[in-house]
Image (cartoon, rainbow, N blue to C red):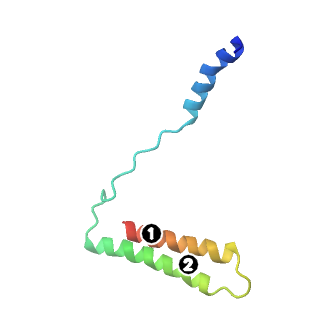
Amino acid sequence: MSILRLALIPTLLAAAAGAQEVPKSQPPLWAAKPDVAAFQRLEAAHLAEASRHIDAVLAVKGQRTAENTLRPFDAALEQINSANYF
């Protein structure tokens, strides 16, 4: 291995380490300490949003595409999962 290549290794390693951003600390799930009513509002909001996306899928007339079918379906599933896993 040439000297130039050996000299570049520490530089490349330092650049790679500097390029990685340290993840920010996320507050715990229950940090806001919602009461029962607040929890129910959060869950209802997720489910209402999921329902809105499902309605959009069902309302499609004509050819189904990724944009008018898969994206709303994925958005609905994301909301359902958010409600389910909260």
Quadrant occupied by the N terminus = top right
Quadrant of the image occupied by residue 84: bottom left
Mark with earlier residue (2, 1): 2
Crowding at mark 2 (Cα within 10 Å: few <14, some 14-19, many 20+): many
Identity of the residue drawn at 68% across and 72% down: 66
Identity of the residue drawn at 55% across and 30% down: 17
Identity of the residue drawn at 30% across and 59% down: 30
> Does dot 1 land on a helix, a strand or a loop?
helix
Identity of the residue drawn at 52% across and 74% down: 76
Q: Nearer the viewer, residue 45 or 68?
A: 68
| Residue 13 drawn at (x, y percent) | 59, 26
Residue farthest to the top? 3
Quadrant of the image occupied by residue 43: bottom left
- The amino acid sitting under disc 2 is His
Q: Which mark is residue 81?
A: 1
User: In the drawing, does residue 6 fall left or right of residue 35?
Assistant: right
Depicted 36 relative to depicted 10: above or below:
below
User: In the drawing, does residue 23 fall left or right of residue 41?
Assistant: right
> Does dot 2 land on a helix, a strand or a loop?
helix
Q: Nearer the viewer, mark 2 or mark 1?
A: 1
| Residue 18 drawn at (x, y percent) | 56, 31
- The amino acid sitting under disc 1 is Asn
Crowding at mark 1 (Cα within 10 Å: few <14, some 14-19, many 20+): some
Kindly identify which residue carries mark 2. Answer: 53
Depicted 58 relative to depicted 39: above or below:
below
Mark pair 2, 1: CA separation: 14 Å
| Residue 45 drawn at (x, y percent) | 42, 75
User: In the drawing, does residue 61 fall left or right of residue 29?
Assistant: right
Q: Nearer the viewer, residue 69 or 21?
A: 69
| Residue 65 drawn at (x, y percent) | 71, 76
Residue farthest to the front? 1
